[in-house]
Amino acid sequence: DRMEPLNPIAAVLRALRQWRPEVTTTTLALIASLFSTLACNGSLWHKLQLLPAASPLAGWGFLAAMAVLVAALQFILFLLLLNRWTAKPLLTVMAFLTGASVYFMHRFDIYIDTAMARNFLETDPREIRDLLAWDMAPYALGYVLLPWLLLWRVRIRRPPLRHSWAAKPLALLAAAIVSAAAFYPISQQLMPLMREQKTLRYLITPSNYVYSLLRVTVLPKKHYQGPRQVV
């Protein structure tokens, strides 16, 4: 019998239907942290590259150590947030918020701080239509739709309980060690930078909107005391 020519589109769709990898929440947290660091923090890396060329902060060594530090800290964040029940719903919401944050930071050169989070929560749904634009399409595809597609094809592995109890603490410990190892050689440059340019921390995605939304929604009155006053 003569074989029919293979339709490339049908072949891709068939392969996608059959692609159902099984991962643990720890692996999913690692993938999410690497994706966030490499693909979602362009504004942060751009700001760091704008530092004076003579500054030791402008070197590739500093940027590499900073990338490892951010990835390790993001890994800790995802480890604390994700479990077998929250992983897919939470990452679905975070993909949308990440795509929106990256777009608005790139498009309008803004920071995602508590004031921006408060404005977001107080936005009238009818005003959202005025913010929509065609240049959002690549961000929606790359940061929202494609991650959603991949995420919901993944199956969450459920290891034996005795193994899961040990896996996450060990992963947290390893991430803390990597964070310390990345922070130590750049600490003398990084600490003054963060004191002088405090807004840089609000470019680290998704930590920026996670922190800002928690400050606005969970502890808005207890911790928010208005703008800082000069002493």
Image (tube, rainbow, N blue to C red):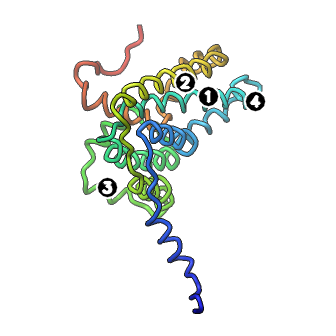
The CA distance from mark 1 to mark 2 is 15 Å
- Left or right of 69 in this view: 59: right
Instruction: Mark 1: give few (<14), some (14-19) or many (20+) Cα within 10 Å.
Output: many
Disc 3 and disc 4 in contact, CB within 8 angstroms: no
Residue 76 image offset from top left, x and y in percent: 45, 28
| Residue 146 shows in this picture | yes
Query: Residue at label 2?
Result: 197
Viewport quadrant of the N terminus? bottom right
Q: Amino acid at mark 4?
A: Ala
Viewport quadrant of the C terminus? top left
Where on the picture, by quarter, is residue 82?
top left
Which callout, 1 or 2, points at the residue further toward the start of the chain?
A: 1
Which callout, 4 or 2, points at the residue further toward the start of the chain?
A: 4
Which callout, 3 or 1, points at the residue further toward the start of the chain?
A: 1
Numbered disc 3: secondary structure: helix
The CA distance from mark 3 to mark 1 is 35 Å
Instruction: Mark 3: give few (<14), some (14-19) or many (20+) Cα within 10 Å.
Output: few
Disc 2 and disc 3 in contact, CB within 8 angstroms: no
Q: Which mark is residue 53?
A: 4
Residue 8 image offset from top left, x and y in percent: 57, 77
| Residue 115 shows in this picture | no
Q: Amino acid at mark 2?
A: Gln
Q: Amino acid at mark 1?
A: Met
